[in-house]
Image: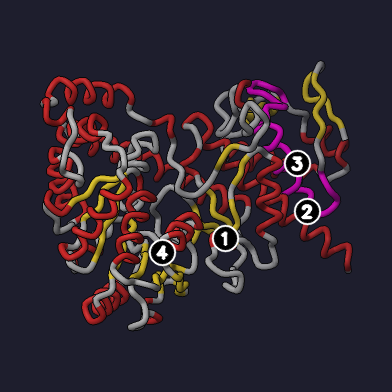
Amino acid sequence: MSLTPHADLDLHLEVGETRPARALERALRDAIVTGRVTAGCRLPTTRSLAADLGVARTTVSEVYAQLAAEGWLESRVGAGTWVAETAPSRPDRAEAQAAEPDGRPRPYWGGYPDASLFPLGEWAAAARRAADAATLAELGYSEDLRGSLRLRAELASYLRRTRGAQVSPERIVIGQGFSGLLALTCRAMAGAGARRLAVEEYGHPAHREIAAAAGLELVPVPVDGEGADVSRLGPGIDGVLLTPAHQFPTGVPLSPARRRAVIAWAQQTGGLVIEDDYDGEFRYERRAVGALQAMAPDQVMYIGTASKALGPAVGLAWAAVPKTRLAGLIAQRSVLNEPRDTLNQLTLAEFIAAHSYDRQVRRMRAEYRRRREYLAARLAARVPRARLAGVPAGIQAFVILPAGTDPDQVVAAGLRRGLAFKALHEYAASAGSGNPPAIVAGFGASPATRAQSDIHLVVAAIEESIADRCRLSEGEN
């Protein structure tokens, strides 16, 4: 139906016959999010809106009060109810739609950082200092395939200080992203006779593809509230790929007991533990969980990356390599003849040395924490039966949906709103995983100016799917 909140403005609201308060609340929020009603717009009186919609006046009053409490609306004594000038997710005109300019949904994947927060000024200053200080040897061909010694020294100090790693510059190898170092590691394992690699039941499909392309057979292990169930590892497994600090994408850390168990397995069998520390800096409730590598540096290949704290454009990652594995890794690098990218490495070394990396991590940690807390608050207010699972950490949210909700319908509702995120089953290593109804929403992926707007769109997609399911159930009955 149409209503007239201002003399020259009509607004279409869809309010169903069931649960009218929730439907009206959602419809008004969506109208503000999408820019159909703008800041300063006066809304109808509770009496006239109730008459137009055919609902009780108390219903409209409760909705207005709820949205005013959340900051969407404001009441002016003697002047009615208005859309607040600082509504939580009111987008700029140019950003009224979440989709890209070409109409494609914007990626809202787990693991994506906010590129708009890249510290361009500090990075440019570090690049200038690094170039000015570069030696002729550093600017030429290098025979050391591990990467820049200056960067390896800075990383060794940084990882010891912030992640508790036991590492020296001699055993660090610089690479092009986590995927590049994982490919080298898997090829080196296969070259040394390894055949089977255990992987977490849920994880990045691309990482499994990299391991399979190296000739390794993948063995999925279940993930529960304590992380990967490493009791499933046996003598026939040659290595295991883990995200122990913050399991991707379920968000649970590997429990202390399972940390001890996987190290014991590696020491007894000679198997390799590959530690993917993709977002270890972003823990919000307490101090970060230390690197698993610190417990057994001769059994654990630790791999970290600058992609989350800085941005994928930097393209650098690092591996702390067990002594017995170093020669095999370097041999694979020699065969592949990867690019050196020395100037970028020197820039990152300067960036770390100037403590700019620490400052950036703190900035990003504070920003992503705010986003996660905002998402948790919106879910609690609007979809209390949905919840965030896993520890407060990282740059994506693992959202458990109410029982009976189809996560694929939530994903489809998100696409209609211009956001592309995934259901949990899309991260599963096998079709028979018995996936709970859940989605993985990458709140870190939004530009800072759209962070809250996108969170509202995700919550609205969940609301829509639940409402549709309720209508279908009522129709069947």
CA–CA distance in space, label 3 to label 1: 37 Å
At horizontal 50% and vertical 29% (from top left) the residue drawn is 449
Say which of marks 4 and 3 sits in front.
4
CA–CA distance in space, label 2 to label 4: 35 Å
Query: What range of the chain is rendered magenta?
Result: 15-42
- Per the image, label 3 sits on a secondary structure element best described as helix
Badge number at residue 60: 3
Badge number at residue 249: none
| Label 2, residues with CA under 10 Å away: few <14, some 14-19, many ≥20 | few
- Per the image, label 4 sits on a secondary structure element best described as loop
Q: Is residue 356 visible?
A: no
CA–CA distance in space, label 1 to label 2: 29 Å
Residue 32 screen position, x and y as percent = 67, 31
- Per the image, label 1 sits on a secondary structure element best described as helix
Q: Earlier in the sequence, mark 3 or mark 1?
A: 3
| Label 1, residues with CA under 10 Å away: few <14, some 14-19, many ≥20 | many
Say which of marks 4 and 1 sits in front.
1
Q: Say which amino acid is labelled 2.
A: Arg
Q: Which one is in front, 232 or 58?
A: 232
CA–CA distance in space, label 3 to label 2: 12 Å
Q: Which residue is mark 2?
A: 19
At horizontal 58% and vertical 59% (from top left) the residue drawn is 426
* Residue 23 sits inside the magenta stretch: yes
CA–CA distance in space, label 4 to label 3: 41 Å
Residue 57 screen position, x and y as percent = 80, 42
Q: Which one is in front, 387 or 336?
A: 336
Badge number at residue 424: 1
